[in-house]
Image: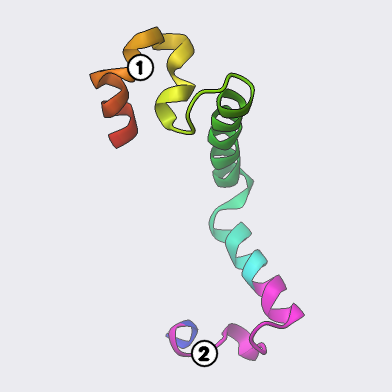
């Protein structure tokens, strides 16, 4: 329970030690595999938003697959999920 009330391993808040501990804990819990999923989704959104001029939403990444149906009820379902 020490990580709820204080800094882990008695590191000073906002210090270089705290930063390295935070990044270490993040990589321990998520690892490269978890962050690669986020990066893949971000790249798909960025590609269609900036290169194709589509809105920055998940339905825009599915536009090549579903066509204009991505702007209807199917697009709403994709954005909700």
Does 37 sit left or right of 14 as displayed? left
In the picture, the disc for residue 6 is 2
Decide if residue 81 is in sight here.
no
Residue found 27% across the figure and 27% down from its top = 76
Residue identifier under label 1: 70
58 left or right of 42?
A: left
Residue 36 lies in quadrant: top right
Q: Nearer the viewer, residue 54 or 32?
A: 54
Compared with residue 46, is residue 70 higher up or lower down, i.e. above or below?
Answer: above
**Main secondary structure found in the magenta portion:** helix
Farthest residue in the right direction? 16
The image quadrant that residue 15 belongs to is bottom right
Q: Is residue 12 magenta?
A: yes
Image coordinates of residue 18 in percent, x first then y, are 67, 79
- Tell me which segment is drawn in magenta: 4-21
Under tag 1, what secondary structure? helix
Q: Is residue 73 above or below residue 36?
A: above
Q: For this view, does 25 lie left or right of residue 55?
A: right
């Amino acid at each position: 329970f020490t990580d709820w009330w204080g800094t882990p391993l008695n590191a000073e808040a906002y210090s270089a030690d705290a930063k390295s501990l935070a990044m270490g804990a993040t990589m321990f819990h998520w690892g490269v595999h978890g962050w690669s999923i986020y990066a893949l989704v971000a790249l798909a959104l960025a590609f269609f938003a900036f290169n194709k001029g589509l809105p920055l939403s998940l339905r825009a990444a599915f536009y090549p697959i579903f066509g204009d149906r991505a702007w209807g009820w199917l697009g709403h379902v994709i954005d909700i999920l």
